[in-house]
Image: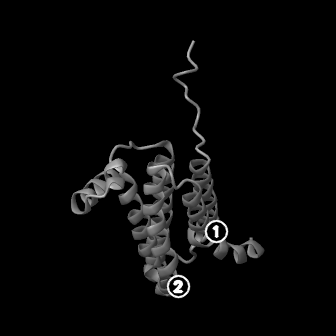
């Protein structure tokens, strides 16, 4: 895992990079465009602020939780955000963006963010317990969190690729006899 940890820095940028190319590929689809614009906005904030937050040591985990929440809010409330912006600007794009419903891809992103929030929350508590001399070893932070984040970044990249190619999950209702 030590050799792999050198590449984790690059994998952090992978979902944002893939989302950028997915945005270019799917520019004509208003639903995907609005979803990816919101996601890229948070992704760029995340990637830029990481260089500062990484030096916070203890409170880095609170920052990671905040960034995940920052991604969940636009995903869950993107229809309301589009409606507000439409009322302010009158641009037809935002009116069209209010017509779309919550998709499987958005649910997958929210689930990935919740798992990341739980992982960083556990590490945040663990660091406080370690600093208070209640525990001696940061097991979760040392042995689980890095691997968990690697998996979550790869999964979020697959979700964005799936969205980009408009792949849908199985429709179990259509397969009934």
174 sits to left or right of 64: right
What residue lies at 54% left-to-right and 59% top-to-bottom? Answer: 23
Image spot of residue 25 (x, y percent): 59, 56
Q: Which residue is mark 2?
A: 51
Residue 19 sits above or below residue 45 on the image:
above
Q: How is the image coloured?
A: one colour
Residue 34 sits above or below residue 147 on the image:
above
Secondary element under disc 1, as helix, strand or loop, is helix
**Which of pointers 2 and 1 lies earlier in the amino acid sequence?**
2
Image spot of residue 125 (x, y percent): 44, 71
Secondary element under disc 2, as helix, strand or loop, is helix
Residue 87 sits above or below residue 53 on the image:
above
What residue lies at 22% left-to-right and 62% top-to-bottom? Answer: 88
What residue lies at 58% left-to-right and 44% top-to-bottom? Answer: 166
12 sits to left or right of 35: right
Report the Cα–Cα distance between label 2 and label 1.
Answer: 23 Å
Any part of residue 77 in sight: no
Q: Which residue is mark 1?
A: 143
Any part of residue 161 in sight: yes
What residue lies at 49% left-to-right and 42% top-to-bottom? Answer: 104
For the residue pair 46 and 137, the one nearer the viewer reads as 46
Q: Quadrant of the N terminus?
A: bottom right
Count of picture labels? 2
> Are there few (<14), some (14-19), or many (20+) residues within 10 Å of tag 2?
few
8 sits to left or right of 52: right
Residue at far top of view: 177
**Location of residue 137 by image quarter:** bottom right
80 sits to left or right of 124: left
Q: Quadrant of the C terminus?
A: top right
Image spot of residue 168 (x, y percent): 57, 38
Image spot of residue 112 (x, y percent): 51, 55
């Amino acid at each position: 895992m030590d050799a792999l940890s050198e590449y984790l820095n690059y994998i952090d940028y992978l979902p944002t990079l893939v989302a950028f190319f997915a945005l270019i590929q799917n520019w004509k689809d208003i639903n995907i465009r609005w979803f990816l614009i919101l996601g890229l906005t948070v992704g760029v904030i995340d990637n830029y602020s990481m260089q500062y937050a990484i030096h916070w040591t203890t409170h880095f985990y609170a920052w990671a939780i905040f960034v995940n929440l920052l991604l969940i809010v636009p995903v869950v409330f993107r229809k309301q955000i589009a409606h507000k912006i439409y009322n302010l600007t009158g641009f037809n794009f935002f009116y069209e963006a209010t017509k779309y419903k919550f998709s499987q891809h958005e649910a997958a992103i929210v689930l990935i963010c919740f798992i990341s929030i739980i992982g960083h929350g556990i590490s945040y508590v663990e660091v406080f317990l370690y600093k208070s001399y209640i525990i001696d070893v940061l097991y979760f932070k040392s042995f689980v969190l890095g691997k968990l984040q690697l998996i979550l970044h790869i999964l979020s990249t697959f979700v964005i690729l799936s969205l980009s190619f408009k792949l849908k999950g199985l429709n179990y209702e259509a397969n009934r006899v």
